[in-house]
Image (spheres, rainbow, N blue to C red):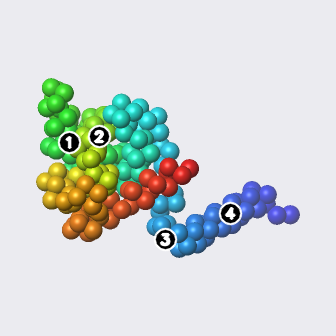
Amino acid sequence: MANPSFHGASLWVKGTALAALAALIASLLCGRPLNDWFVDDTRFSGEIRAAAERHGVDPQLVRALIFQETRFRPFRRGRKGEIGLMQVLPEGSAADWARVHKRKVPGTDALFVPEMNLEIGCWYLSRALRRWKEYDHGLELALAQYNAGLRRASRWKPDDLRGEVLDRIDIPSTRSYVRNICSRYRRYLKK
């Protein structure tokens, strides 16, 4: 007689293999990287909603930005010192936030705490969105600012308020960053 626990394990392995194969096929058909299928983009939903609403930002936009930045990994560190879910820079957005709020700049440990990271990231994103709200493609300019800084975003702004932005972004990684977030944001809005 066959060992029932072995049979169950065998079914589990087959099921897992089928799920992986299905994800690979879907990835190829949709053009999305395979590891994106295994991201839990519902993590921190409550915290994201609270911080986004506090700063007048759409929570779905924040989700899309976090997906691009860290794939919802709160302990992620960037190559240039960015920290946490929204990749907050201690000497950049965190220092600006502290100055405006007349507080001490949060330390590295504090910036890894999702609530603090979201507070500063949403505050910073909100400021960028307000700065570019007159432009038809203000979202793209705000995301470019979030990624590459105000000086560069200002250089990429079109002469006409209705002008295109993406083609003006001359840093390929920033252009891809903005395009990816906007695409994911549109998908989130359709759900």
Tell me: residue 82, above or below residue 171: above
Q: Position of residue 42 (x, y in %)?
A: 50, 45
Residue at the image position 43 percent from the left and 59 percent from the top: 183
Q: Residue furthest top?
A: 102
Q: Earlier in the sequence, mark 1 or mark 3?
A: 3
Tell me: residue 101, above or below residue 160: above
Circles 2 and 1 in contact, beta carbons < 8 Å: no
Report, in whole angstroms, how far the alpha carbon at label 1 lies from the one at label 3. 33 Å
Circles 2 and 3 in contact, beta carbons < 8 Å: no
Structural crowding at the residue carrying mark 4, measured as other residues with C-alpha within 10 Å and reported as few (<14), some (14–19) or many (≥20): few
Q: Name the residue type under label 4.
A: Gly
Q: Which mark is residue 93?
A: 1
Circles 1 and 3 in contact, beta carbons < 8 Å: no
Q: Which mark is residue 31?
A: 3
Residue at the image position 47 percent from the left and 39 percent from the top: 45
Q: Name the residue type under label 3.
A: Gly
Report, in whole angstroms, how far the alpha carbon at label 2 lies from the one at label 3. 31 Å
Left or right: 52, with 90 as reference point: right
> In this orientation, does residue 37 appear?
yes
Tell me: residue 156, above or below residue 105: below
Left or right: 12, with 26 as reference point: right
Q: Position of residue 88 (x, y in %)?
A: 25, 45
